[in-house]
Image (tube, rainbow, N blue to C red):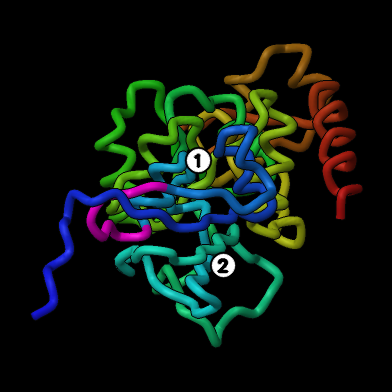
Amino acid sequence: MQKAADPLQKHRALFRFYEELNDFIPLENRKKRFIYFFNGNPAIKDAIEANGVPHTEVDLILVNGRSVGFDYQLQQDDDVAVYPVFESMDISKVTKLRRLPLRNPTFILDVHLGKLARLLRLFGFDSLYRNDFTDPQIIRIAKQERRIIITRDRGILKNSSVTHGFYPRSTNPREQLLQVLQRFDLFSQLHPFQRCISCNGKIHKVDKSQIVEKLPPKVAASYDVFFRCQHCRKIYWQGSHFEKLSEYVQHVKNFL
């Protein structure tokens, strides 16, 4: 009669994380196979996150050369390869870790990413942000509205109910924007100056006669074309600030 395995016995597996997933793991384990010790048979999702990588960053897991889902239970001597999210590669024939991609993405950002939210809105992306959002609120809204969570808090992305998320590596908002656009392959979906950068509402052209009383006298005398946010009613015109933003928009488009 075979003796049952001791669930407290220390086991070992080999792990290798690829490409940008190495940003999350200790320096000594980056870009190479390393030994991971564990007890019992944990779900591979838990083992991946124990190594510091949020599951939202992962799109393909191979165990002994076979693709598996997050619920796979880690075994003694498994050889695990973990790959980041693929946006331009067809992996339809292997195990999908998410039911549906988000090809017309909308976002919700944590309380520390207000400047990034404004930049995403500048380029036309529906981006929810409030400086008093709690983590549970962010997770609930993301689930209800199928929004991608953008956060520098790994704890949010490790929550099991989060399916789509991204951790910007940079702390610079303009660099963060490029990282989001590259990660989700969004350069073909840029629609600048169509959203209010203050509230995320849609902007539409408005007749000057409807808003002239709300304009500063110099603006009313100098400009004839105006736009207004349908939500917060903020008024926009193409002044010197618009010219600077246009230069920045073109700079981002050059990354195509």
Residue ID for mark 2: 103
The amino acid sitting under disc 2 is Arg
Query: Magenta span has 16?
Result: no
Question: What residue occupies the far left of the structure in this picture?
Answer: 1
Task: Measure the alpha-carbon separation of dots 1 and 2.
Answer: 16 Å
The amino acid sitting under disc 1 is Ile
First in residue order: circle 1 vs circle 2:
2
Disc 1, SS: strand
In-front residue for pair 28/126 = 28
Say which quadrant the C terminus sits in. bottom right
251 lies above or below 73 = above
Q: Is residue 157 left or right of residue 191?
A: left
Question: What residue occupies the far bottom of the structure in this picture?
Answer: 93
Q: Position of residue 151 (x, y in %)?
A: 48, 35
Residue 237 visible in this rendered orientation of the protein: yes
Say which quadrant the N terminus sits in. bottom left
* Residue appearing at x 82%, y 25% in the figure: 239
